Amino acid sequence: MFTRGLVFLAFLVLGGFVGWLLAAWPGAVVGVVLAALLAFYLDTLRLVRLQNWLMRLQSIEQDDPARIQVLPEAPAGGLLGEIADRMHRLLRWRIQAQRESKLQLQEMLAAIQASPNGVILLDAQGRIEWCNQTAAGHLGLDAARDVRQHVAHLIRDPLFNAYVAAADFSAPVSIAGRQNTPSRPVRLSLQVHPYGEGQRLLLSRDVTLIEQAEAMRRDFVANVSHELRTPLTVLSGFVETLQTLELPPQDVRRYLDLMAAQSNRMQTLVSDLLTLSRLEGSPPPTLNDKVGVDALLSQCEIDARALSSLLGRSEQTIEFVQDAPADLCGVATELQSALSNLVSNAIRYTPAQGRVSVSWKLLADGSGEFSVQDNGPGIAAEHLPRLTERFYRVDRSRSRDSGGTGLGLAIVKHVVQRHGAVLHIESEPGRGSHFSIVFPASRVHRADTPAELKAA
Ligand code: ADP
């Protein structure tokens, strides 16, 4: 400012001096006035250039902020030039900061887009400001079209509307998802989280599997309790009778036998439950452990004949056929349990004059099939998809009478899955059932294959 004052003064002195040289004192006065006018004119010219430059900057910033980095050059020279230069730098800095925060916002939105949970930003009036694709999919929204729409108009679920009306967002609300159908239920958990100045974050989560698992857990506990309560009630009844009544020895003997049968039933149930929990908790079977199919079949045959005579069905025709010796890779106890369960079901459900055929054969693609065929009562088609569910029984009393726990096929399914095998069930009421397990070639080794071929 001081320099500028000096320059202006020098300008006036120069004007006065030139005027004095030309026309003495009157010339000096005219020279000073003309110099002041010239200085004013030059400053006005610079101001106009600065104004034009600012207007160009403004239009460029509105049209294409990126170009501000290179265009236009600030008017150079003098104090106004310096002001223009500082403004230019300030503007560039502001645009750079804007660009960085825009980039950060885009990255944040991309991260929220990738979230497995739905995210909806609501303004203070409950209108949608932004939502990610997951939320749009969960709730049937259009991320672009539904912006500024009131969320309660789009999520038309009475439970959700009551939740929003009650304004108690301490816990989530569970509603049916947009794609919910009776055959494929979809459950969503929605929770509102207030933030900022009245804005709200609405999170949606697909809880179908969690709710299904929770329902299964509840059913399972109820089923186990029920299964244990029945023999326990019978047992405590007999104990009470024996404690209170003086019974003849043959009655005591009969009661003790019945009590032993009930406690056996409980033992079998607990043992099946433990087997299931071991199957769920242990690591997948490796390919290193091997067991001979003939050993598995021999044990099955011993168990089958013992069970058949225990159930008083010694006339049952039971046949075991093995087409080629082979080894199976897997856990011997698990494999034995799966095969024995299928064989014992066939024995238990097939009447005394019936026939049970058990076979092992190697298939052309190197896989191996274990199959159990019976000519028992068969199973109606509608039951087939549910047979491997825990405690699912077609004929409850027939299962219990023959010592069934309702867990046999659930155990088979687990063992089959863990060994990468496939369980096939074919059955027709009145004609019998055919259960088979196909083990993949990777788990089947022909026992007569030379060692070097096996290695290859
Ligand atoms: P359970 O201990 O009751 O036999 P499973 O899980 O082994 O339980 O079998 C489930 C149900 O499938 C049985 O209750 C029975 O109704 C039916 N089932 C299984 N195997 C046979 C079969 N070979 N013939 C007829 N019904 C069968």
Image: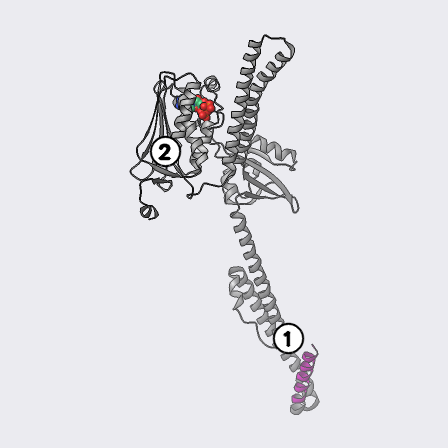
Q: Quadrant of residue 217?
A: top right
Q: Is residue 399 left or right of residue 149?
A: left
Q: Quadrant of residue 425?
A: top left
The residue tagged 2 is: 294
Identify the amino acid type marked 2.
Asp
Q: Is residue 454 left or right of residue 55?
A: left
Crowdedness near tag 2: few (<14), some (14–19) or many (≥20) residues, C-alpha within 10 Å: some
Residue placed at 61% from the left, 15% from the top?
239
Q: Nearer the viewer, mark 1 or mark 2?
A: 2
Q: How many marks?
A: 2
Quadrant for the N terminus, please: bottom right
Residue 96 visible in this rendered orientation of the protein: yes
The residue tagged 1 is: 79
Residue placed at 48% from the left, 34% from the top?
179
Residue 125 visible in this rendered orientation of the protein: no
Where is residue 450 drawn, in percent x and y? 31, 45
Q: CA distance from mark 1 to mark 2?
A: 103 Å
Q: Is residue 84 left or right of residue 386?
A: right
Ligand 1 neighbours mark 1 (CB distance < 8 Å): no
In the image, residue 382 sits, relative to residue 285, either above or below, namely above
The answer to whether residue 9 is magenta is yes
Q: Which residues are magenta?
A: 1-18
In the image, residue 230 sits, relative to residue 42, either above or below, namely above
Where is residue 274 drawn, in percent x and y? 53, 31
State the SS at label 1: helix
